[in-house]
Amino acid sequence: MNNKKEKNQDFEKKWLDVNDLALYLNCSKSTIYHKVSKGKIPHSKKVGLRFFLPDIDKWLLEHDYFRPDDAKEWAEANPAKLD
């Protein structure tokens, strides 16, 4: 995926599996499994391990978690907050 728009189009579906979530968060699958085992990330096990994208986005905001590409954009938009 070459740009953010393409990446966001891939995540238009609402439920993600571990592979999709790792790509979305730009982290390893083991990091996700660790967070699931500690109850630190919203998930469902009704039909395998799945993650509801709106819940993940809310969780990201509540925990000030930035995906690396978002962090760069935020830093550029908020230079005064980095001083």
Image (spheres, grey):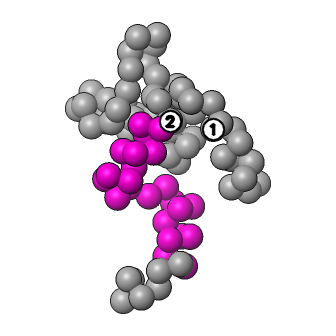
Left or right side of 38 for 15: right
Q: Nearer the viewer, residue 79 or 28?
A: 79
Res. 28 visible in picture: no
Q: Which residues are magenta?
A: 54-76
- Type of amino acid under label 1: Phe
Q: Secondary structure at mark 1?
A: loop
Label 1 near label 2: C-beta < 8 Å? yes
Question: Which residue corresponds to mark 1?
Answer: 11
Work out whether 22 lies above or below 36.
below
Residue 62 on the magenta segment: yes
Residue 51 on the magenta segment: no
Work out whether 59 lies above or below 63.
above
Q: Can you name the residue that lies furthest to the left here?
A: 38
Q: Position of residue 46 (x, y in %)?
A: 41, 11
| Residue at left offset 36%, top offset 44% | 59
Work out whether 6 lies above or below 64.
above
Left or right side of 38 for 63: right
Question: Which residue corresponds to mark 2?
Answer: 53
Q: Nearer the viewer, residue 5 or 38?
A: 5
- Type of amino acid under label 2: Leu
Left or right side of 39 for 5: right
| Residue at left offset 66%, top offset 46% | 8
